[in-house]
Image: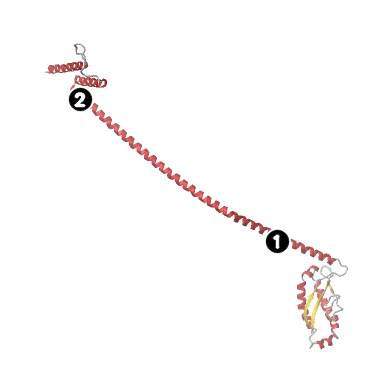
Amino acid sequence: MWKSGESGSSFDKNLREITLITKDAFEPQLPLSVVVHIDYRKAPMVVQRFGNVAQLVEQTLDPMVSSYFKNVSQTKTFIELIQSRSELQHNASEDMKQRFQAYSLEFQEVLIGTPKPQQGDNKIENIMAQLLDRQIAREQVETFAQKQIAADKERELNEAEQRAAKQKELTGSLVDISIKENQGAANVKAAEKRRQEIEALAQAERFKQEMEGSGRASAIRSVGEAEAAAIQAKSEAMQGEGADKQLMQTVMLRLAEAFEASRVPLVPQIQMGGGDNNAFSTLLGLMSAIKAGELTATTEKE
């Protein structure tokens, strides 16, 4: 075991941490331990070759292991050496297994500790503090990112809950809009139907008025034609009978209308004096005079 103050047996009590020199000039000390098994059948040959196990450890294993890790450390920075410790341990196990076989040793495993600074060396402590700060910063960034994700998820959840809460109201609004649209369409159709009915009634009324006007005009025309025919017939009759006879008829008609309107009796109830002064006498006289005129005219023609 390459670690000060600790040993796995009496053979490695003089081993110390391996001092490395990294690519960026740090000089850490690397504690490690190597587990080796010696087959009892090969033990006499190992003792014969190296004298004893202590000499094998100090003169062969220690230089071989130290050389290997010093060579590897020169290819890596101190940070890389720390970050790739697991990879370094795996590669060392594969390489040392082959090397130990050359000495009739069975390699079991190598265990690498954390590099540490030498006494009085503050550079490694500073770099370790920087690594710690860097790791803390990365963790904070990751924490902030996770918080941001959590905040976004929370906002999405709140929005989803609000949408779900408003979904019923939104659905009701959409239904109301659809109902109003249907009602509007129904009102438009009803208005169009009323317009058509009004137009039909107006056309019927206009047709009725036209027919009534045509009937009245026809009736007036018929009455006019009848009156014209009557007047013409009367005129012809008057021309055939003579003017005197027509005059007598007219006078008698007018007198009869006058008597009827005034309700004057044709024969008076009381006669004043001895004369014949009444309307009836006057009418008889007039008729006699007309008749005498007709007889005279007939005599003259003969």
Residue farthest to the front, as pictured: 270
Task: Report helix, strand or loop for mark 1.
Answer: helix
278 w.r.t. 227: above or below: above
Q: Which of marks 1 and 2 is nearer the N terminus?
A: 1
Badge count: 2
* Residue 96, picture quadrant: bottom right
| Numbered tag placed on residue 237 in the rendering | 2
Residue in the foreground of this view, choosing between 16 and 268 = 268
The image quarter in which residue 26 lies = bottom right
Residue under pointer 1? 146
Q: Residue at x 53, y 50 (%)?
A: 176
Q: Give, as a three-letter code, the residue at label 2.
A: Ala
Secondary structure beneath label 2? helix
Give, as a three-letter code, the residue at label 1. Answer: Gln
How crowded is the residue under tag 1: few (<14 C-alpha within 10 Å), some, or many (20+)?
few
Quadrant in the picture for residue 256: top left
- Residue closest to the far right: 120
